[in-house]
Amino acid sequence: MRISQSKIHNVDKFLLEFQQDDHLYIILDDLDSHKDNLIKAGFSSSLPIGEKILPSALFGTVSDFNANGKYEKLRDMPKETYYKTQSAIIKAYGKHDVYITKQQPYKKFQVELTETAPSIELVILLNDNSEKIVSSDKLTYNENNKSLIKHTINLFLELFGECIIVDNEFLSRQKTKIKKVSWNILPKGVMPWAKLKEPLIDLLDKTKVENKEDTLRRFEFINSFSPDFVATGNGGFNDYVVFGFQDRNLYVLENSFAGNATYIFNNGWETISQLSKAEILAESLQEHRLIHKKYWKRSIKEILSGKD
């Protein structure tokens, strides 16, 4: 069944042809008509068969929930103090202008994760006519999965404005090698900040970060400890940058948006690169979680200098 609308509310009427525990997929065909949004979602421009992504969270509320989960403000709890860097140039007539920065405190509600991100991923496959399609993973039709099926349909509708519900027979029997593309690794080796800054600015432009200079200063500070590689997040991971210190088995995931957190793992890059967004945000897996607060730099320095 093809669906062409902005959102569905009652999923049952779209699933009448399926029996209990049937397998189904949500797909998109005619990729040429949707190429711009496919690239915006995180796919490579060539749309290679087997590429798999977590879609960007920037399309709207459904894609944001899919990548990040749902948080509620704890309005009955005291607000927490966060800090953002503010810059200014003081004009000094007859002398050099003075560039100053200061840490500006601001209050923010504490938040609590109330719904874990579904983390629905999309993959490019072939249909039974050997034509490219974008597909969800296999979904099983039963009462417990109705909300997930509804969410997946609404995710496609928010991203592309249409989708099709199909069964197993629609997909090609050809075995496809799946390549999950969550991270784009920049050229390996210690990279001077002047060179690294350019791709990071491009990332911040895509994610619509408002205070870019504040974010770039955090990136620059972490980069000053000479990571072995830097990777930028793709699709739904595009609000994070990874700084890998392989000799110390430390991997710093820095959030582009102020007032969030820095996650530091020591699980090895192969393991970390396969984590879902929900697993990254889960507090049980990381070695350190550092909120962007007053002593953030001191904490980063202690950990990356081996003094923690």
Image (tube, rainbow, N blue to C red):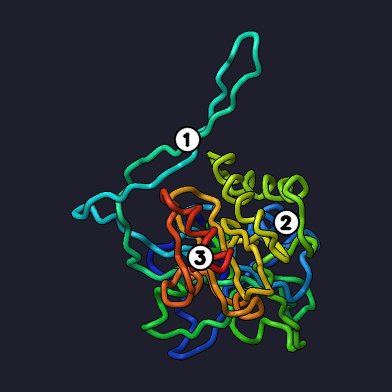
Q: Which residue is mark 2?
A: 35
Q: Which residue is mark 3?
A: 263
Residue furthest toward the front? Answer: 307
How busy is the neighbourhood of tag 3: few (under 14 within 10 Å), some, or many (20 plus)?
many
The image shows residue 263 at horizontal and vertical percentages of 51, 65
In front: label 3 or label 1: 1
Amino acid type, callout 2: Lys
Q: Which residue is mark 1?
A: 102
Above or below, comparing residue 30 to residue 101 in the picture: below
How busy is the neighbourhood of tag 1: few (under 14 within 10 Å), some, or many (20 plus)?
few
Left or right position of 121 against 173: left
At x 29%, y 55%, the residue is 73
Circle 3 SS class: strand
Residue at mark 2 to residue at mark 1: CA–CA distance: 43 Å
At x 45%, y 65%, the residue is 289
Which quadrant is the N terminus positioned in? bottom right
Left or right position of 163 against 308: right
Above or below, comparing residue 87 to residue 65 in the picture: above
Amino acid type, callout 1: Lys
